[in-house]
Image (spheres, rainbow, N blue to C red):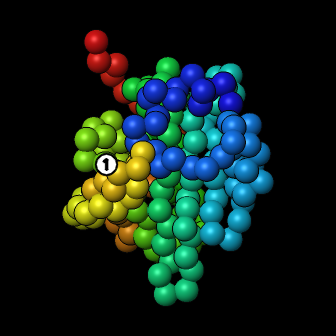
Amino acid sequence: MALRESSLDHLLPWEPRLKVRSEAERWESFFRTSDAEDRQRFLICRNEDARMVGYVGLNGIRHGVLQSCELGYWIGKSFTRNGYMTEGLLLAVRHAFEHLKLHRVEANVQPRNVASIGVVKKAGLRFEGVALRFLQIDGKWCDHQRWALTAEEWKDPFARSRSGNLPQRQKSQRRT
């Protein structure tokens, strides 16, 4: 809870306003509904100290002929530009394709959210176009860029190389 509360100024410009009474209620709902037929939610935690830095979710999971989901994600303000979100997103996409056997993963990002666009690009999603007035953010209908990746395009960056080694996470360069 403290991570979200300390990051609200960083997160609220990009999020729909959900009708919850408190952050505690938000978290109770989060954990209660994190593993369902139509959604899988994951906390992103640092390897070195298990501290939570953000979240990624596979939302609107659809099976049958569609086999798809939408990505939702956020990172705490103090943990941006360290590669955590990219790695978390890649692991969630891997889970979608390899474990849930989905065919398509998509993300919808506001055009002025440059950081989020950078993350989906690094994760290998491709730009598909703009959905006009796609989602209501703070009472206004906002356009969103649509980004997607299909199972045929997926290249697992965590797969073992021929030498048997796993690739190392590359830390993003912090801009000053």
Q: Is residue 144 visible?
A: no
The image quadrant of residue 150 is bottom left
Q: How many marks?
A: 1
When asked about the image quadrant of residue 101, the answer is bottom right
Q: Is residue 84 above or below residue 55?
A: above
Q: Quadrant of the C terminus?
A: top left
Residue 99: % across, % down? 61, 66
On the picture, is 143 further left or further right than 93? left
Figure quadrant of the N terminus: top right
Residue farthest to the front, as pictured: 139
* Residue that appears at 55% across and 86% down: 64
Residue pointed to by mark 1: 110
Q: Nearer the viewer, residue 5 or 169?
A: 5
Give the residue displayed 60% in from the left and 38% down from the top: 44
Residue placed at 73% from the left, 50% from the top?
Answer: 29
* Residue 72 seen: yes
Residue that lies at the very extreme toward the top in this rendered image: 176
Across and down, in percent, residue 85 comes to 47, 38
Compared with residue 48, is residue 160 higher up or lower down, i.e. above or below?
Answer: below
Task: Judge from the rendering whether residue 22 lies leftward or rightward of residue 159; answer left or right.
Answer: right
The residue under the point 70% across, 55% down is: 34
Q: Position of residue 52 (x, y in %)?
A: 64, 30
In the image, taking residue 54 as reference, residue 173 lies left or right, namely left
For this rendering, which residue is in front, 167 or 88? 88
Extreme residue in the left direction:
129
Tell me which amino acid carries mark 1.
Answer: Gln
Q: Residues within 10 Å of mark 1 (few under 14, many from 20)?
A: many
What secondary structure is found at the residue carrying circle 1? Answer: loop
Task: Indicate the position of residue 145 as horizontal and vertical percent values.
Answer: 27, 56
